[in-house]
Amino acid sequence: MSSMRFHILLSLLSPSRINAFQLQPPPRYTKSTSTPTLSSSYDYNYAETSPPSIHIEENTYRDIDSLTQWAEEAGVQKAPGLEVTPSFFESEYEADSDYEAMTTEDLPSGSSVLYVPQYLILSSNAAMAELRCEEMYEAEQRLIYEDGDEEKSNDMIRHYYLIYKILLEYEKGQESPWYAWLNSMPRYYSNAASMTSFCFTCVPALMRKLAMEERSILKKNHLAIMNTPYLSDETKRSAALWTFAHQIVYTRAFEADDGSGDLRIVPMGDYFNHGTEADVSFAYDEEGNYWAQTIRDVPAGSPLRIQYADPTNPSFFICTV
């Protein structure tokens, strides 16, 4: 998106242009009391004293009702017809169902659909500001590509800090401000990070190449996690857990279109599925709040979809949830 188009979209998404809902004053909610200032002596090992209450087994029920209640209480505002429901082809009785945003009411083009305040958005820049220190140096070195590709190395490091943030919040269990969101995440994935060696022999050459690249990223992230100071040994040893965090970040984080390189995961906004012809577009205002609005007329009963990436590039779509 060009700079001019970005600013035009922001003007369309400003509160004065809202026609799907009226922005209400946010509730008294902040995550600052749960996000401590990092110091080398800070004890992040919540798991040793308070076992996490987030189960990651594949058949774990996804608690969508608690997610939507938490979002409302935390300051998320949405169009009256916006719901998170099982995907059209999924049974609502399956624990591992895919879920997506859809509307139960007609939404004209230009309707405001979703507002998510900045303090709920998980950001790689914020995670790096919170967690980066001398003790993380060795981990970062493991993420640098040997061919000297600075862009790929920086991208790995940004994803890594988001993964690390997810693991820290997991260890806090119900004490985490993002507990309800984490407990709504999928546990079952059909993508490269979840494939076995046999699976690689069953896919076409291009998909095999892309899948193996993703598996190598998963391994690099795990090696880096093993060389960090703040996670419990139990978390570091759990392949299922760091794969869970990896899957969340690599299927839900998008780079902000402001030149910062910041990767952001937007709770509730991450339930917009992909569509080659998008129904919804989104942007961030100057304060970092997230706004989404329709860019075409959307009839009631339809999913609300965004475009994840270039529709001619298959790599992003190997990771679907």
Image: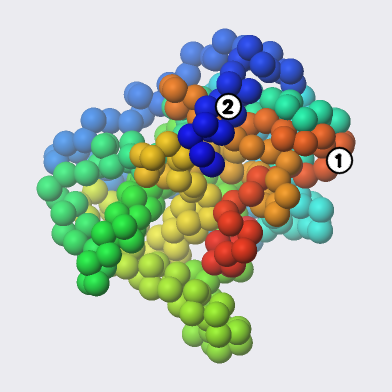
Q: Residue at x 40, y 26 (%)?
A: 31
The amino acid type of the residue labelled 1 equals Gly
On the image, numbered disc 2 is attached to which residue?
8
Dot 2 falls on a residue whose secondary structure is helix
Which mark is in front, 2 or 1?
2
Q: Which quadrant would residue 207 be assigned to in this image? A: bottom right
Relative image position of residue 201 (x, y in whole percent): 56, 89
On the image, numbered disc 1 is attached to which residue?
301
Could you tell which of marks 2 and 1 lies nearer the N-terminus? 2
Along the viewing direction, whichever of 137 and 176 lies nearer the viewer: 137
- Residue 55's place in the image compared with 292, above or below, is below
- Residue 273's place in the image compared with 282, above or below, is below
**From the image, which quarter does the C terminus lie in?**
bottom right
Relative image position of residue 227 (x, y in whole percent): 21, 60
The colour scheme is: rainbow
Callout 1 environment at 10 Å: few (<14), some (14 to 19), or many (20+)?
few
The amino acid type of the residue labelled 2 equals Ile
Relative image position of residue 202 (x, y in whole percent): 61, 87
Q: Residue at x 27, y 64 (%)?
A: 149
- Residue 179's place in the image compared with 254, above or below, is above
| Residue 58 visible at all | no
**From the image, which quarter does the N terminus lie in?**
top right
Q: Residue at x 35, y 70 (%)?
A: 219
Along the viewing direction, whichever of 318 and 87 lies nearer the viewer: 318
In screen coordinates, is 218 left or right of 17? Answer: left
Q: Residue at x 68, y 17 (%)?
A: 18
Relative image position of residue 236 (x, y in whole percent): 31, 61
In screen coordinates, is 181 left or right of 133? Answer: right
Kindly check if marks 2 and 1 are in contact, taking CB atoms under 8 A apart as contact.
no
Q: Marks 2/1: CA distance?
A: 29 Å
